[in-house]
Image (spheres, helix red, strand yellow):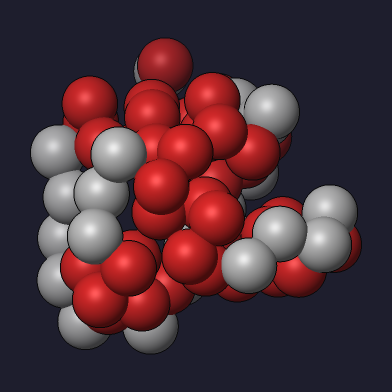
Amino acid sequence: MNNIASIRQKIGMTQSALAQKAEISQPYLHDLEKDRRGARLETWARIADALGVTVADVMGVDDDDRKAAEA
């Protein structure tokens, strides 16, 4: 599960504002937040940049997942 909605809400940003800033459609963002659709890494990066966090933060990757991936 990703963290888009929780991060977005924590900083007080609407779906519409995030979608515009990340240059994606609001319905697509809604589907991403609900894990109904996938996204390319480029899209995750644009969302992370718009929220001011890392891609790992947005995708919900924790330190244990990162360490396992590096092993």
Q: Is residue 51 above or below residue 60?
A: above
Image location of residue 16, percent across then percent down: 48, 65
Residue under the image location 52 percent in, 68 percent down: 15
Return the residue nearer the eye: 7 or 70. Answer: 7
Residue under the image location 41 percent in, 47 percent down: 20
Residue 24 visible, this orientation: yes
Residue under the image location 16 percent in, 60 percent down: 38
Residue under the image location 67 percent in, 30 percent down: 53
Image location of residue 51, percent across then percent down: 64, 38
Image location of residue 41, percent across then percent down: 23, 31
- Give the residue furthest to the top: 70
Residue 57: quadrant of the picture: top right
Residue 32: quadrant of the picture: bottom left
Looking at the image, residue 22 sits to the left or right of residue 8; the answer is: left
Looking at the image, residue 30 sits to the left or right of residue 15; the answer is: left
Q: Is residue 70 above or below residue 37?
A: above
Return the residue nearer the eye: 62 or 6. Answer: 6
Q: Quadrant of the C terminus?
A: top left
